Amino acid sequence: MNIQQLEYLIAVDKYKHFGKAAQTCHVTQPTLSAMIQKLEEELSLKIFDRTTHPIRTTDAGDEIISYAKAVLESITELKNKAHLLNDVLAGKINLGIIPTVSGFLIPNEIFDFLNQNPKIEMNIYEMKTDDIIKALKSGEIDAGIISTPYREAEEFFSDFLFNEELMIYSSYENKDEHFISSEEFNSDKFWLLEEGNCMRKQMETICHLKENSLKPKNLEFSASNISTLIKMVDKTGGITVL
């Protein structure tokens, strides 16, 4: 039994597909299948039921997967501890980040951080806020960057990164006003980010928003980034928040 076999187990359990798991682990499917079969023979039990589509993890396999995850987490902690004892910042970080800030943080702060800490291996995933919360709970990611306050995230340890003012982007002329209250604009003419985004929930709560009346009746629209919302305002009018 080795660490690679445990990583392969977890990948197959996640994707329920040997091909996808092999691609994620950067090995060929025959290699991954052979390694898992060898482990099953060593443990004298079936971890996966290969007769179903998608592949099903057996009841015994579920317990083995739980132990495998715990072992890999312990190994990661051991490596990180060793690096700290050597006064070197190192290790692997899986980070989820909302699309509204990833374009600003990744090319600047995160790239600078990685250049200053070459022994850090970071995997970054653009995700909606709700998906970041789910991934934190399941252990798929180690940390997430979201917009706060966000009630569902209160159970996790959090730290403050930066503060930004919300800005109105509007098709309406209002050159003399520097500030605007939620009562001053038409709340049914807002373009918002897709469901599951923290900024959408915040704006719905603050401004008591309704369905956008500017949207064509035969259009179902879901935006994941602010630049798309800006273009929608330019094209059809209305308001969005940056």
Image (cartoon, helix red, strand yellow):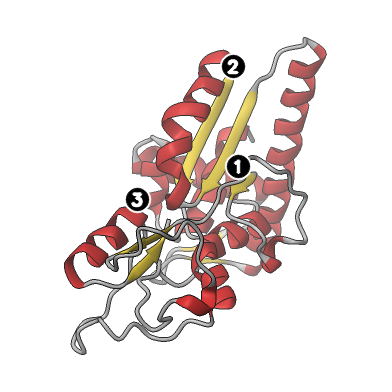
Is residue 53 positioned above or below 212 on the image? above
Residue at x-position 60% and y-position 35% = 93
Q: Earlier in the sequence, mark 2 or mark 3?
A: 3
Is the N terminus in the top left, top right, bottom left or bottom right quadrant?
top right
Of circles 2 and 1, the one toward us is 2
Residue placed most toward the observer, 228 or 185:
185
Q: Where is residue 36 drawn, in percent x and y?
A: 51, 46
Task: Please determine whether, in this image, residue 19 is positioned above or below residue 95.
Answer: below
Pointer 2 residue: 117
Q: Position of residue 87 (x, y in %)?
A: 77, 11
As rendered, which of 160 and 71 lies closer to the eye? 160
Kindly identify the amino acid type of the residue bearing the numbered disc 3: Gly
Residue wearing tag 3: 19
First reached walking from the N terminus: tag 2 or tag 1: 1
Cα separation between marks 1 and 3: 17 Å
Name the mark on residue 6. 1
Say what secondary structure mark 1 lies in. helix
Residue 38 picture location, percent across and down? 54, 42
- Which residue occupies 65% across, 62% down? 62
Q: Is mark 1 in CB contact (under 8 Å) with mark 3?
A: no
Q: Is residue 125 left or right of residue 87?
A: left
Query: What is the secondary structure assignment of the residue under circle 2?
Result: loop
Q: Determine the residue located farthest toward the front in the rendered image.
A: 176
Query: Dot 3: within a 10 Å radius of its alpha carbon, few (fewer than 14), some, or many (20 or more) residues?
Result: some
Mark 2 or mark 3: which is in front?
2
Residue located 77% across and 61% down the image? 155
